[in-house]
Amino acid sequence: MKKIINDPNFVVKDMLEGFVAAYPNDVKLLPNTTVVVREDAPVSNKVGLVSGGGSGHEPAHAGYVGKGMLDAAVAGEVFTSPTPDQVLEAIKAVDSGEGVLLIIKNYTGDVMNFEMAAELAEAEGINVQQVVVNDDVAVEDSSFTTGRRGIAGTVFVHKIVGAKATQGASMEEVKAVAEKVVANVRSIGMALTPCIVPAAGKPSFELKDNEMEVGIGIHGEPGIKRTEVTTAHDIATELMEKVLDDMNLKSGDEVAVMINGLGATPEMELYIVNKEVNNILTEKGIKIYDTFVGEYMTSLEMAGCSVTLLKVDEELKSLLDAESKAPAFRR
Amino acid sequence: MKKIINDPNFVVKDMLEGFVAAYPNDVKLLPNTTVVVREDAPVSNKVGLVSGGGSGHEPAHAGYVGKGMLDAAVAGEVFTSPTPDQVLEAIKAVDSGEGVLLIIKNYTGDVMNFEMAAELAEAEGINVQQVVVNDDVAVEDSSFTTGRRGIAGTVFVHKIVGAKATQGASMEEVKAVAEKVVANVRSIGMALTPCIVPAAGKPSFELKDNEMEVGIGIHGEPGIKRTEVTTAHDIATELMEKVLDDMNLKSGDEVAVMINGLGATPEMELYIVNKEVNNILTEKGIKIYDTFVGEYMTSLEMAGCSVTLLKVDEELKSLLDAESKAPAFRR
Amino acid sequence: MELQVNHVITWMEKSNEKIQTNKDFLSALDRAIGDGDHGINMARGFNEVVTKIKETDYSTVSDVLKDVSMTLLSKVGGASGPLYGTAFLKMSTSLKGREKIDYSLFVNAVSEALNGIKMRGKASTGEKTLVDVWEPIVEQLQKDSDFEAVTIETTAKNSMEATKAIEAKKGRAAYLGERSVGHLDPGSVSSYYIFSALSEVIKEGV
Amino acid sequence: MELQVNHVITWMEKSNEKIQTNKDFLSALDRAIGDGDHGINMARGFNEVVTKIKETDYSTVSDVLKDVSMTLLSKVGGASGPLYGTAFLKMSTSLKGREKIDYSLFVNAVSEALNGIKMRGKASTGEKTLVDVWEPIVEQLQKDSDFEAVTIETTAKNSMEATKAIEAKKGRAAYLGERSVGHLDPGSVSSYYIFSALSEVIKEGV
Ligand SMILES: Nc1ncnc2c1ncn2[C@@H]1O[C@H](COP(=O)(O)OP(=O)(O)O)[C@@H](O)[C@H]1O
Ligand SMILES: Nc1ncnc2c1ncn2[C@@H]1O[C@H](COP(=O)(O)OP(=O)(O)O)[C@@H](O)[C@H]1O
Ligand SMILES: [Mg+2]
Ligand SMILES: [Mg+2]
Ligand SMILES: [Mg+2]
Ligand SMILES: [Mg+2]
């Protein structure tokens, strides 16, 4: 394991300190927590937005804290959902009296920890609502199981819901737009190499020199299948097929595209994937409203990428365009 | 070699097409070239700014094209400086009559190719000036040799010179501020793993499981020394020592800091390095005016980072703060 | 036979020892069908539990269990944190104010814990979760009429091993569908360690 | 003996063959003390050169050399592109309009090429660059009185090998300082192939 770290048991603490040190005018770390909040939290007359999850997905989630996006991000241990006490601190720090919406990625751990925090916060008289993001089409969408995972599409939820809340919308309106994004966003990922959780010290899975995993989860959860590495063209085609199959888009529909690097993939490769994705959409007559290429929701040093499509209407477009001062999503 | 690409010989073309496809309202690719220019080039009454270099350093350099930064970026083959004919196309596309400043990283190949382009452009009556960035303190600064390399500090040159030119400053003023940034910016890098040029198919160097290279170049050029991987604390201390030794900063001086990932390093680790760098500067009484953490000047999928310090005064601070619409450097 | 404060403390210490010893094994099981952190999570949590309860004076069993619960809730994270946290919280609540626990109180407490796990995780038997150890244990405890080291150990072990054959429907392993078959459920294995530790406490004399 | 259009074309074809054959070797040399692309750069450039000059009709040697120069300039990139581009451009200029080249014109052209390389690269002898092959070649050509296959081959080979002992002062290898000693200069090796190809053309009869 080659990493630029100090003690593997303190990577989250070290990272958070380094993060707030980089943006001292914009964010702060709540003392003795792993909660990053806006410097000016709670923002009056605004629904508070809290997200978070395991660490190792940087810039998610602290990078999305800022004017126009989240009010707070709660960091768990690497790939481990944060605990209820931490989430509770975040909720309390950002509630201005308008209530707090939790944006949760659909993992059993995240859902349970955030839910417990919500129960505790409600006991303290705070109106807490939640939305669960489940954009990963690699997983079968079944109500009898855990259901789909939340991956990079979550960033679109942060952005759009952040814009809505910034406009002073009510909890009801904010939650409605959050659910609208969730209903219209789909993603899928693939990996060329695994990643290494610092405290574990070994790769979370193994791939042969010529293998890739299609449908990988952002914690290295196995995907749909393991095949030989093909070309960017074939990879994009396969990922897009899975996403489009699930979306029911017609010619003339508009989408926002996100090509997300999982950590070790050179940006060059992400742009090559974007070329292919762009071609596929253009051929189908689907209009690309906006494109985001970069590292938005990573898996430590995993090599690979994910493709996200968000079907947009006029409301979502204007919210997507709205100003954001979050360090990792400046608009 | 595991990469998400099509034909290794066409990675630059594919990437550039994917790049302009992502930002169609902001940039365009000059037909049959590897030159990305602002959509609205040439911008009247503004000195044109052209940079570029080998590919593989994404988001450099095309990511820095946009209002407030560069007017054009010329992409060479991977790690190979672009050719004079391409640079000439860029110069011609961005000259509004106010002349064009070339921002060149100090590599023999880059200097020669850009210089030949300048000669050709001058023959066509365009006023072309140049500034050569040489921020890498890993290399001895000698006028008898090639001198120091240009690395991540170049991004500060793009930003600040871009702001100056946007204000409508004359060529003389723009060039003067460029030279001021060059005189005040210092960097050094380190690598944990090598990278693979697609057309070569093999790593450009090798490091043992417990080794790192201090002072690595952004093309994998050997550094100052090869040692055992130590902690983030020790790595930051060593890099900062080299940079500070060369800068003559006093307590009370102000700097902008850039912690740059070389490609495969998780953002988590960059923030850990930032924590250490922040501590070192704070201890010495050096004020941190602003901090930039992320991938700004990469080396394909190399794991490692570089640290850049820019000593700022009031002029540089206000230019650093100025608006930028470049995709990879939004302010 | 009655469970007292010192027994519960020993139970947690023994649980912790087993978890620390098998930390890498638990993570390896989780790597196969999850995200590879179960050993790390449990080891971090139970280490804190032992530190906490050793430095505190307790007069009731319920207070020990409350601290166990709170520590697990705030230190484990992931899916297992709220589940184990809830389990011990429910035990604590059902034993509120008690210094000594007789067998029927104990069975009732574990049964409450199981309900808590099922409520929190929205899981039922046969979904390859720790319910698949806790549910058989509760059934066995209800059959027995006093603390029985052997039946607890055997039941926990057998049901833990039986998770291998189950297709996961809940938790991270559910993403794998059929491919989860043939692997032990990590959470069931850590639950086995906890009941195995309980069995040893009983054997040493409750 | 005179150099004509077809000789120059053969010269370039033979140069290209050697460069393609040794592409990986040149890149490996560059990996050791540079950035590992010299073989890729030269192979890309000379491949284009051969394509270009084969599909074009030429009446003068200078026109062939002009196309060689332009193609190298626009296809090689890096340090070697402008250097070789300048070298062939200077040859073309000094031979402007000529259909046949006698020995003294040829020596003059190569000498102009060397000046061009030195001007462009701001390098002089002993700095571990391709000057260390071109300068001895010019000196040897000036000593000889007609095209001599053997002296060209020997001089190019010896001076290429001699770059091993030199400490780099220019180009990317200069960053290495003393550590560049003991490695061949990649650009000198590609220059050797070009003169070795010339030597073969001469041997086959100019
Ligand atoms: N819904 C659920 N109900 C009960 N137990 C569950 C549920 N989801 C997961 N588990 C248990 O949690 C274990 C995984 O814990 P852990 O690895 O610590 O958390 P995570 O899955 O968040 O990484 C599983 O092996 C399983 O026994
Ligand atoms: N200033 C210079 N003058 C003459 N030759 C040079 C100079 N700099 C580099 N070279 C030659 O160029 C060769 C490297 O070419 P190449 O690898 O294609 O370019 P780059 O160094 O830009 O990657 C070196 O081996 C050396 O012979
Ligand atoms: Mg986990
Ligand atoms: Mg090169
Ligand atoms: Mg797990
Ligand atoms: Mg080279």
Image (spheres, coloured by chain):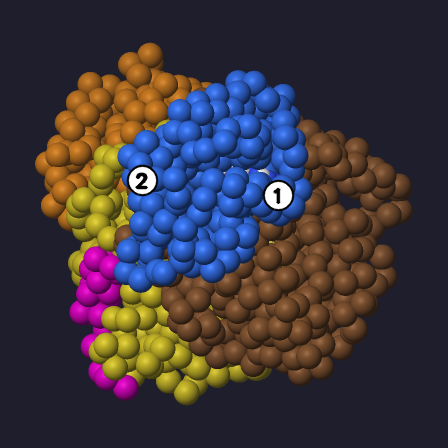
Chain colours: A brown, B yellow, C blue, D orange
Q: Earlier in the sequence, mark 2 or mark 1?
A: 2
Rate crowding at label 2 as few (under 14), some (14 to 19) or many (20 or more) other CA atoms within 10 Å.
Answer: many
Q: Please name whichever residue, A35 or C156, is drawn nearer the observer in this view of the structure.
A: C156
Q: Position of residue D206 (x, y in %)?
A: 35, 18
Q: Amino acid at mark 1?
A: Asn
Q: Find disc 2 in the rendering and name its residue.
A: C14
Q: Find disc 1 in the rendering and name its residue.
A: C115
Which chain letter matches label 2?
C
What separation in Å lies between label 2 and label 1 (alpha carbons)? 24 Å
Q: Position of residue B268 (x, y in %)?
A: 42, 55
Picture quarter containing residue C112?
top right
Quadrant holding the C terminus of chain A:
bottom right
- Secondary structure beneath dot 2 equals helix
Which chain letter matches label 1?
C
Question: Magenta region: which residues?
Answer: B233-252
In this rendering, does residue A142 appear at all? yes
Residue D51, compared with residue A187, is above or below; it is above
Q: Is B194 placed left or right of D75 in the picture?
A: left
Q: Position of residue B74 (x, y in %)?
A: 52, 53
Does the magenta portion include B243? yes
For the image, the number of numbered tags is 2
Rate crowding at label 1 as few (under 14), some (14 to 19) or many (20 or more) other CA atoms within 10 Å.
Answer: some
Does the magenta portion include A268? no
